[in-house]
Amino acid sequence: MIYLDHAATAPPDPRVLEAMLPHLGERFGNPSEPHAAGRMARADLEAAREEIARLVGCETAEVVLTGGGTEADNLAVLGRAQGIPGRLVISALEHPAVRGTAEALAVRGWRVEIAPVLTNGCLDLNALDASVRSGDALVCVLGASNLTGVLQPIAEVAVLCAERGVPLHVDHVQTASGAPIDLSSLPGVVTAAIAAHKLGGPRGVGALVGRGIRSLAPISFGGGQEAGLRPGTENVAGAVALAAALSIRQGPDAVAERATRAALRDQLEERLGLPVAGGVAERLPGHTLLLTGLRGDTVVRLLDERGIAVAAGSACASGETAPDATLTAMGIAAAQARSAVRVTLGPTTTQSDIDAFVTAWSELEPALRAAAEAAA
Amino acid sequence: MIDLSRAGTVARPDGEGRAGGGRCDDRVRFTLGLDGEVLRQVRFGADACAATTAAAAWLAARAEGGTLLDAARLGLADVLAGARIEPAAAECALTAVDALHAALGDAVARGARVAPSAGRSLIAMSGGVDSAMVLTEAVAEGREPVGLTLRLWIDPEAPSPDRACCAPSAVRSARDLCHASGVPHLSLDLRADFRRTVVDSFVAGYAAGETPNPCTTCNGAFRFDALDAAATRLGASEWRTGHYAQIVERGGTLLVARGVDPTKDQSYMLGLVDPDLLQRVRFPLGRRLKADVQQRAAELELAAARAPESQEVCFLGGGALAPFLARQGVGMEPGPIVDEDGVELGRHRGARAYTPGQRRGLGVSRGTEALHVLKVDQPRNTLVVGPAGRLGRREVPLRDLRRILPIDTVDACFRLRAPAVPGALVPDRAGAWLVRLERDAFAVAPGQVAVLYSDDAVVAAGVVAG
């Protein structure tokens, strides 16, 4: 199989598995216990936490390990939206983990403002500037769109929020796979969500990181683990895996790997010659959203039959293909949005994968276009 | 694997059909190239989701090289199994099935012919319980049935478009019923012809203040001819419908006669059918009671046994006459309601939407007496009303009279299942015909069809002229 859906989940990196395995075996202790096994687990956990903090640019005490990216996003939003309902501003690009949480708050009386996006896939900073005001409970902007891969102007957003004293949450779940994350450079009260499985780690572990952790209210209760923000016996193996995955994707070797990935992506786009959503903006290195002009899900199926895994840009749900909200926000027409196919490369992607994709595409494209034309 | 090798269009196709464009905007088109009754070439177009595209590709591959009737046996269940489509995507696959069947029907409409077979019966399928029973019995009899549904009318603006007799859902349920027994099913799209011959004349009749009878006109001038032509093309030696009527022979002539079930007799609706067709038509339910048919259908667990009975004019689609006429561009202007002395009793919302005999919806009274429409005075946009007793008539002039047998002593019937009134067919002074009745006939309106029976068999029919 040629796997070009790294943004959905990345194949496990053997180095991550190797780092994690002992913690599923002999190093099994509960970090809360004072005996030797517990102390060993505590030390492993804190070492992982320290590594995570170092790699994202925050204090060790500013890392809350969670059960994944969605849980981290929920904690960041719900942990901030306390007391009398107020106002939140979220970007039109948000992943459902944030958008869905904001919608749930709207039901409880919170006012949710959606900050618009420009046609290039970037957040409209002027509109955000006009929207955010002092007293807002939170601003949410993702670091990179999981659909288009377009990187968002987080530094500017952080300044804008800090000026008004409004906390900022950044969903960095997709960003961490291919762009540097440095929270230390961002002013103000900031949190960020990350997840291991987008980085070659296992599913079911993520973290909420950043100095904003210190002022969050808990949203779940129990034994007080993770500074009381994520109670429950810690997933030491997951924490170690997250640290290992981050150190690969955010470490010194990542710079060259990202450049290789971006070059393969650029080559793919050039060989295909298709319009690309957000193609003019700065994007994650292996990410492209092709506007094929055909039905996205049909292209996905045909490529799958040829052993190539990619994703459709819009999901067909109950007989109705709803164009993705992000693409609609970018002003892409429904028919074009429906044709979107997301191809995401990873560190393991090779030139021969790209060649195979181009070959498969050149085989199926004429027939599929003939089919579409014959339906007219 | 989705086989895209048949994506494209047959040059100068012998049949072409489309479906889709609904909620998810999937579109499928089939084009067929015929060699006799063999589908020499089948090409598909699909601008559609993966499931729909897979279904279209599979159907094209499966249909190509087989006969037209083989292809007409292909249904949803075959596609779901053959193209391995999840049941959740059945609606997607259905778009492809609809398109193929539209193409097959179009091929028949364009003149495709199937080699005759003495055992073949064409079954006119409406999707209702009666035609379902006719089909089931033909299968049990060992005949070689072919189901046929005419698509006559779709009015998306009607309150319940699916209540029209030939709505897409009715076509599908007729098709499913056939396919469940391995019987080929075809549907012919005759919407343009139906509009021209039946609906336009119905609308024109109302616009002129008449009360046309579209069902009788449809059967007589249109539907039976279409079914007979299709039966010939599909090589059927006979064709059957689920009408509650009989065919009897009088002196070497075949006549339509009343069905045995008096509550369901549909002979009136067949009053204008060309007697020449009767040699090839069978009405297997003519000697049956509707209640028995329903009970038998329930025993057989026919899905159609639960279908709602259609009693109304099919193309009204569950709505009232006035809004239908308005949708067809017939203007409605308020006007006076007067009694026979010309005294205004109230106002109506448009005389064209009323029918002589009508009592409901008038909203006028005179003392305690119930008032009925006696006359629709179209030029003056006036309704003349009076008591029920004034509705009776003894002489009814006719136009367009067709006499099948030269019998003058008749029982006249002016609407479906109205009691027949004995009388005589006599020439009037101007050389036209009138029926002179022995008793009053009530609520006889111009434009209605007069069906004249002798001994329960239709011997003549014409249109009420005034």
Image (cartoon, rainbow, N blue to C red):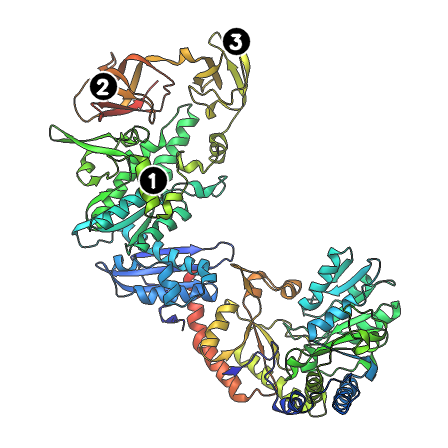
Q: Residue shown at 69%/74% (left/top)? A: A69
Q: Nearer the viewer, residue B199 or B248?
A: B248
Q: Nearer the viewer, mark 3 or mark 1?
A: 1
Q: Secondary structure at mark 1?
A: helix
Q: Which residue is mark 1?
A: B294
Please indicate, yes or no, whether residue A94 appears anywhere in the rendered image: no
Q: Residue shown at 46%/63% (left/top)? A: B47
Residue B334 shown left or right of residue B243 in the figure:
right
Task: Please tell me which of labels 3 and 1 falls first in the chain.
Answer: 1
- Distance between the alpha carbons at the discs numbered 2 and 1: 33 Å
Task: Please tell me which of labels 2 and 1 falls first in the chain.
Answer: 1
Residue B274 shown left or right of residue A376 in the figure:
left
The local crowd at label 2, few if under 14, some if 14 to 19, many if 20 or more residues have their Cα within 10 Å, is many
Q: Residue furthest front?
A: A35
Q: Position of residue B450 (x, y in %)?
A: 30, 23
Q: Nearer the viewer, mark 3 or mark 2?
A: 2
Q: Which residue is mark 3?
A: B343
At label 1, the amino acid type is Gln
Task: Please tell me which of labels 3 and 2 falls first in the chain.
Answer: 3
The local crowd at label 1, few if under 14, some if 14 to 19, many if 20 or more residues have their Cα within 10 Å, is some
Q: Give the total of numbered labels.
A: 3
Q: Position of residue B412 (x, y in %)?
A: 27, 20
